[in-house]
Image (cartoon, rainbow, N blue to C red):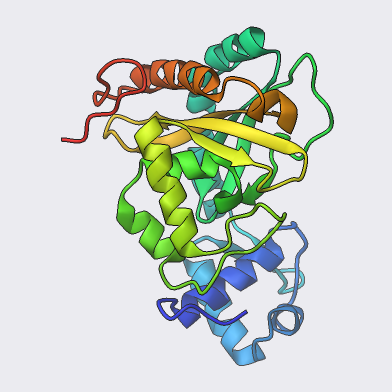
Amino acid sequence: MAARRDSVQSVERALDLLEELASGEALGVSELAGRTGLVPSTAHRLLATLARRGYVTQRRDSNRYAIGLRVLELASGLEDALAHLRRVARPELESVQRATGETTNLVVLDGERAVYVDQVQGSRSVRMFTIVGAAALAHTTAAGKAILAFGPPEDVEGLYGRRDGLERLTPRTLTTVEAFIEDLERTKRRGYAIDNEEHEEGVSCIAAPVLGPDGLPRAAISISAPTPRIINADTGELGALLREHADRISAALGAQELDGVGARVRR
């Protein structure tokens, strides 16, 4: 894959090293250099810098490197924030599931990926990709589109502005940036997003954004089910239901930019 023009090569290389160590295996400089395509001297310099900052540690008995405690500290802060979000959202997910019988998800955005961080299984569920811990390309999911549509336009530009096209997963996937942006505009007008078999054939989703205290999206809640149960249903009614419960989560998180069910005020 070609490097992005706005990437910093040394940062990319340091992250490659961290990702190789993320499994918990202790590795030597030569092993890490071989796995990441770096020359050993470059790998050694980067590892020394990471070690000084606590992101890796060098074992005295073998001189091998392992992941450092600083990474765990950063991860624990993220987990605390996600735990709070899950606590606040869980009653609303359960309420939506009881009202619809469908699988209900809590999703956050990680760059170009929509990550499923909580879920209430539907009473009529079938096997789908939407499981806790799974990630999907944001442009193929209702949740990803809901978060991007209500976020700053520059976020979309930063992620997709230089793309010649978007990855196709199904015949219905939006594969041009222009079509994707048009879909985000429709999402913002109606207040909820739709994935009509854009990630997985036979499965569709509807999602609404959850806002933080600054009025910007923190997450989205979604319903996922076999397409006939989503697209052939009253999507407007399902969208309104998700907006209502997403707004309750937003209010619990301290969002002040709500004006009635699902209506967002941009001051």
Task: Tell me: residue 131, above or below residue 19.
Answer: above
Q: Position of residue 54 (x, y in %)?
A: 51, 60
Residue found 71% across the figure and 77% down from its top: 32
Residue found 70% across the figure and 19% down from its top: 102
Residue nearest the observer in this picture, 220 or 27: 220
Residue nearest the observer in this picture, 213 or 145: 145
Q: Note whether residue 226 is visible.
A: no
Residue nearest the observer in this picture, 99 or 220: 99
Residue nearest the observer in this picture, 98 or 218: 98
Q: Position of residue 132 (x, y in %)?
A: 70, 34
Image quadrant assignment for residue 41: bottom right
Q: Is residue 67 left or right of residue 164?
A: right
Residue found 64% across the figure and 40% down from its top: 196
Q: Position of residue 157 (x, y in %)?
A: 37, 62
Q: Position of residue 215 (x, y in %)?
A: 28, 33
Q: Residue furthest left?
A: 267
